Amino acid sequence: METTTLKSGRILNLQVAPFAVANKLRKVIAGELKGVDVEFEKLDLKADLTALDSKALNTFKNIVCQLMASDAVEGCFFECAARCTLDGQKVTRESFDDPDSRGDFLPTAWEVIKLNIAPFFGSLNLSSLTSGAEKKSGQA
C-alpha cells in the first residue's frame, strides 16, 4: 500500500486494483486516446508546459480533455479506487460530494490511475519504435 498526502492535507492510501479491473482501465484509456492526434516527436511528457510550442500544447490539452470528459474512464477510476481510502474512508463518488473536497477529485484520480496503469508499461521498451523511424527516414 502506498500513501500520499494531497495538497489539501488529506491522506490518500493507494492499493493496486485486481488485474481485471486495472486492465479494463488500460483498455478504456487506450480506446479514448485512439482518436487524439498525437505528434510523438513533439510530445515530451516531462517538459515544462510553458516551453511547449502550440501544437504540442494542443496535443497535451486534447489528451487531458479527452480523458477528463470520459464517463468510461471515470467509471474505471472508481472501480480501481475501491481498495483505496481518503482520510480512512473508502474512495467513492460520495467522497467528493462536499464542494470543499472536490478539489481532491482530480489529484486522487491521477494517483489511482497512475498506480494502476504504470505496471503495464514498466518493462516495455518503446525506444525501438523511434529508433526504427529514424533509420527509415535516413534511408534513401
Image (cartoon, rainbow, N blue to C red):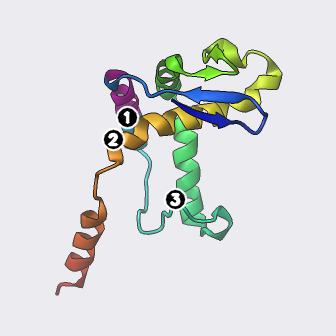
Give the quarter of the figure containing the C terminus. bottom left
Q: Which residue is mark 3?
A: 45
Q: Position of residue 26 (x, y in %)?
A: 37, 34
Q: Determine the secondary structure under disc 1.
A: helix
Type of amino acid at the residue the image marks with label 1: Arg
Residue type at mark 3 is Leu
Instruction: Measure the C-alpha gap from mark 1 to mark 3.
Output: 18 Å
The image quadrant that residue 54 belongs to is: bottom right
Q: Secondary structure at mark 3?
A: loop
**Which of the numbered marks, if any, corresponds to residue 26?**
1
Q: Residue at x 52, y 39 (%)?
A: 66
Where does residue 36 sit, x and y in percent of width and height? 44, 48
Q: Which mark is residue 129?
A: none
Q: Which residues are magenta?
A: 20-28
Q: Main secondary structure of the magenta part?
A: helix
Q: Residue shown at 34%/47% (left/top)?
A: 121
